Amino acid sequence: MKRTTVLFDMDGLMVDTEPLARAAWQRVVAPYGLTVADDVYERMLGRRTVESAQLMLDALPLPLSRDELVARKTAEYLRSLDGGVPVMPGLWVLLARIDALAIPWGVATSTPRRVAEIVLGKLGVVGRYAALAAGDEVAHGKPAPDIFLLAAARLGAPAAACLALEDSAAGCAAAAAAGMRVVAVPTEQADPDAFAGAYRRYASLSAVAADLELLLL
């Protein structure tokens, strides 16, 4: 089946917000004399905030409940967006190519919907995407397929007709489990060996744009 829609992950793929998220987590734990280790943060990539908070609590002796940790991290993260969101290289090139082909596209993100709408608003793409599915709208986060399946349903497309773009191993696994063709554009923080199941792997969104028509076949 030919792919007729494109689904984007958001953080680390459309916007370079992973460093901002990590810094927000670190600001929350710093008053307790703690640090977010690389291996802990790597396991958090692509996952919902609530699941990331649980990973933090499992790894660090924090005197906070999961809900308290989520609330503090979210507040810190939103403050970091006051100056705008950093755009990933090649995003505008890829979106222009998608628009030129008249392909509907959507966003399938682990981020809570309220936060995702703020990020996408600051990015300036509200009104351009046809669907948004967020982590707090499903029962199971990535690597389960729920977020991608919800996004496909909101686009009115079968999963097999979706080309999914992801930067994390958990996200790639989720899109593959949904039955989608998956293209990986890993961030520097991600383990490149974790993307063996992706249909293709690219270094940038510009490179994806150059091959877009072939990827849709």
Image (cartoon, rainbow, N blue to C red):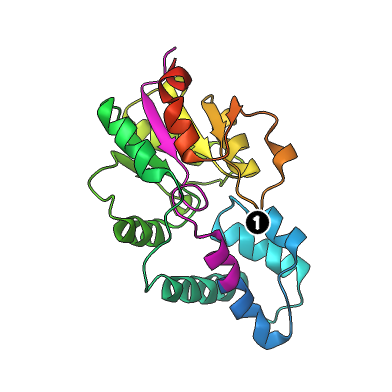
**Closer-to-camera residue (198/133):** 198
Q: What residue sits 40% from the left and 44% below the top?
A: 91
Q: Secondary structure at mark 1?
A: helix
Asked if residue 64 can be seen in this view, the reply is no
159 left or right of 173 in image: left
Where is residue 67, by image quadrant?
bottom right
Q: Is residue 187 covered in magenta?
A: no
**Closer-to-camera residue (17/5):** 17
Q: Position of residue 139 (x, y in %)?
A: 52, 46
How many numbered tags mark residues here? Answer: 1
Q: What residue sits 67% from the left and 83% below the top?
A: 30
Q: Position of residue 105 (x, y in %)?
A: 34, 35
142 left or right of 17 in image: right
Where is residue 124, by image quadrant?
bottom left
Q: Is residue 5 covered in magenta?
A: yes
Where is residue 37, by image quadrant?
bottom right
Answer few, some or many: residues within 10 Å of disc 1's Cα (few below 14, many 20 plus, some between 14 and 19): many
**Which quarter shows the N terminus?**
top left
Q: What residue sits 46% from the left and 54% below the top?
A: 136
Residue type marked 1 = Met
The magenta stretch is: 1-23
Q: Is residue 174 above or below residue 41?
A: above
Q: Which residue is mark 1?
A: 44
